[in-house]
Amino acid sequence: MSTPDLPEPVSPGLTWRPLTEVDVPRWYHLTQAIEAADRPAERYTEDDLHDELLAGSWKDPAHRSLAAQDEEGNLVAFGLVDVRPGDVSTVRASLWGGVHPEHRGRGLGRQLLAWQCAVGRQLISAAPGSAPGELVLHSDEKLTDRTALARAAGFEVRRYHLVMRRRLTGEGAPPLPEVDLPEGLRLVPWAPELDDEVRLAHNEAFADHRGSEPRTREDWQRWVSGHRDARTDWSFVVLTDDGGEPRVAGYTIAFAFAQDWVDGVKEGWTGLLGTRRAHRRRGVGAALLAASLRAFTEAGMDAAGLDVDRENPSGALGIYERLGYAPHQVEVVWGAAVER
């Protein structure tokens, strides 16, 4: 794939080039400065950055990454483009980047985003099939400069994600819920032999969710159940128990992202929670969350966290609110359609 021409940097003394594996420590230093200024809900370790760059057979940092380096060798801005295999209904190019706080206001973010959009369009055009394409980026609602940048580049708001938190300990923490499943369903701990059926259940459960695409085995094992921060001991599955072959009715996969505990609150994170459509409105999601809340508490967590599409079609937001979760931050998902 050829790389589109880049605009000339606004400021002299910067070299634009792809990121490489040896850049990860300097890249991490840059992301720490960005996170200190922006206070995002999600933060990155060096290992996370290494994976974002290289973990996946589809990764191609030579053509899908760009960084600005100053004369002292410091990275001051970066941008990545990711198109994961397996997209069916819409081929999405995810754009992620940032600029060091001391180098903002010089047009670097605008140039990076223009480059990312051009690369994203190329990748979408080269993807197999004829599904429509979309450029996607995320921003924290409170960062008005990101809002202005996205709108200026032609992006529109696609949806809002609520980052929610529930206290587990201390004053104001609600009691842990007790949720019973109806006859014909039983809750079990996550187990390796259930993992691929859980993946298939997830693909079915999220087929009607905006922005969701099927997860391949490679993607699932790298970024979900096999992720270094996954806590499968805090994860649970609801199986059918009606005399036939047991099937996954619902599932939850939990994580512990210690790098996000900068406010001193240890948080168990529900990364995925889903119920197959045939079993919705039977208390499956609430039972799974109740089991996770108990596991988080027993592990010494101070709070439980998750995020949810504000317009979730399955009614998940109402379940979370009833179990004591409240909005903590708001993330905006932006999109720009790409014709194929």
Image (cartoon, rainbow, N blue to C red):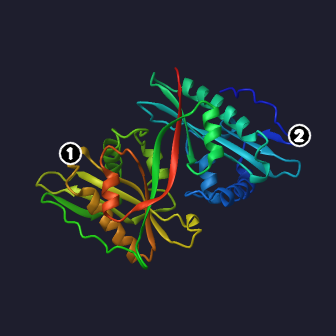
Disc marking residue 278: 1
User: Residue 290: in sight, yes or no?
Assistant: yes
Element under disc 1: helix
Residue type at numbered disc 2: Pro
Q: Which residue is mark 2?
A: 12
Quarter residue 241 falls in: bottom left
Q: Residue placed at 45% from the left, 30% from the top?
A: 90
Give how far across and how far down residue 340 sits, in percent: 52, 20
Residue type at numbered disc 1: Ala
Quarter residue 289 falls in: bottom left
Q: Nearer the viewer, mark 1 or mark 2?
A: 2
As displayed, is residue 5 above or below residue 35?
Answer: above
Left or right of 298 in this view: 239: left
Name the residue nearer the viewer: 183 or 156: 156
Give how far across and how far down residue 32 sits, in percent: 69, 59
Quarter residue 25 falls in: bottom right
Name the residue nearer the viewer: 289 or 199: 289
Crowd around label 2: few <14 · some 14–19 · many ≥20 (10 Å): few
Left or right of 69 in this view: 291: left
Left or right of 337 in this view: 320: left
Q: Residue placed at 58% from the left, 51% from the top?
A: 142
As displayed, is residue 324 above or below residue 118?
Answer: below
Instruction: State how far apart marks 1 and 2 are (Cα).
Output: 60 Å
Q: Residue placed at 75% from the left, 55% from the top?
A: 26
Give the mark nearest the N terminus, 1 or 2.
Answer: 2
